[in-house]
Amino acid sequence: MGRAYEILKERGFVEQVTDEEAVRELLAASPVTCYIGFDPTAPSLHVGHLVPIMSLAHLEREGHRPIALVGGGTGLIGDPSGKTEMRQILTRKQIDANAACLKTQLARYLDFSQGKSLLLNNAEWLTKLNYIEFLRDIGRHFSVNKMLSYESYRIRLAQGLTFIEFNYLLLQSYDFLELYRSHNCLMQMGGNDQWGNMLSGVDLIRRMEGATVHCLTFPLLTTAAGRKMGKTEKGTVWLDGNLTSPYDYYQYWINTDDADVEKFLGLFTFLPMDEVRRARNLQGRDLNAAKAVLAFEATGITHGLNQAKAAWLSSQAAFGGKTISPDILPSSGIPRERAQEDLSALPKLLQSCTDLASGIPAYELFFLGGLCSSRGEAKRLLSQGGGYVGDRQIKTFDEPIALDAADENGRILLRKGKKKYLIVQASQ
């Protein structure tokens, strides 16, 4: 408990804090209740949410009590922070369905049993507010001039800021007040673009309760290549395994830029920092091994150890990975043995020996196996040289794939681009 603030700071979570010494002492003295809000604007959280999630997990490990606040109420309004245009307004039914999904996901990272962490939904109090009473009791404490000075609102003024969005700051501040009153919550955390909103909550509690509370923000992360965290050419990297498979999730992390490895190991794993700092001196094969450790640990936290092992084995088999030395981040649970020919975790397409004996057009297998969403897409991919059987590039879209391409176990390895694989397994 005593090192909670130091842990957050040395791992890279701290950007701004209301009073650093006061927060350090607060977290060192006794268990503290703190919260972060997650608006249910989609049916899944994504990699961009992992910094706040991991910060709560670290505090829980240090004996504090995190509150993961699902924004079933604020999600009906839409946070203007970091947006150049108004968020899409979702229905109450959509918000409720998304909120239920988020609750399930957050339980993978936090222990909600026996009050170790709390999972709340601000719809419980925000949807019951009387508008006139809210304006009179809460709204009178907010200065419009001050609100307009906050970056999140100032940026939006040029594009147009709706009145419904203008109320978001009041509702977020009221959340903090409600959690202070009901759970003695003394600290709010969130992205650095939330600084103004969070300070307003601190000020509201001071005015209405005469109490001192604090807030802490995280840096808004981008990769070394300047890309927003959790975004790829293919789209968002979701935490839901049905939207982003554990294998693709693993591949996202193993493709981390060299310059980001140490930073991401600190933020997205629980490995000791004395080991994490070793990554800054690694090069070549050893640095690639550290990326495999990062991918394994991050996938294990989100999808469980079994899925992490399956993704690691698939990646090792498909890309010809080598044994990872125990000297490289030894606290990691990554398997140290080589995967060799274990392709069991890759998706499979069963095909009869009769069909394969005469050969099946490559585009047909790429479509039937799900590597491409249509036969037309498969033909275009293969015509442009984006398909492989084993390590050999497929020359024409209708090239027949037959049993002579199989290994001794009757398996044919197909690849789309650099990262998407399929095993065609001959059936008897």
Image: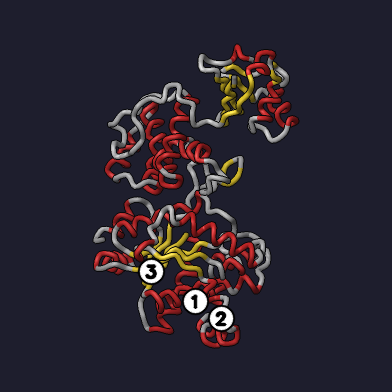
Closer to us: 74 or 136: 74
- Residue 95 falls in image quadrant: bottom right
Image location (x, y in percent) of residue 217: 42, 61
Image colouring: secondary structure
The answer to whether residue 154 of the structure is visible from this angle is no
Q: Label 3 belongs to which residue?
A: 187
Q: Amino acid at mark 3?
A: Met
Q: Amino acid at mark 2?
A: Leu
Q: Label 2 belongs to which residue?
A: 129
Q: Residues within 10 Å of mark 3 (few under 14, many from 20)?
A: many
Mark 2 vs 1, N-terminal side: 2
Closer to us: 156 or 252: 252
Q: Residues within 10 Å of mark 1 (few under 14, many from 20)?
A: many
Quick one: which residue is furthest to the front in this view?
428
Label 2 sits on a secondary structure element that is loop
Image location (x, y in percent) of residue 137: 52, 86
Q: Residues within 10 Å of mark 2 (few under 14, many from 20)?
A: few
Q: Amino acid at mark 1?
A: Tyr
Label 1 sits on a secondary structure element that is helix
Q: Label 1 belongs to which residue?
A: 174
Distance CA(mark 3)–CA(mark 1): 14 Å
Mark 3 vs 2, N-terminal side: 2
Whether 334 is drawn above or below 80: the answer is above
The N terminus lies in quadrant: bottom left
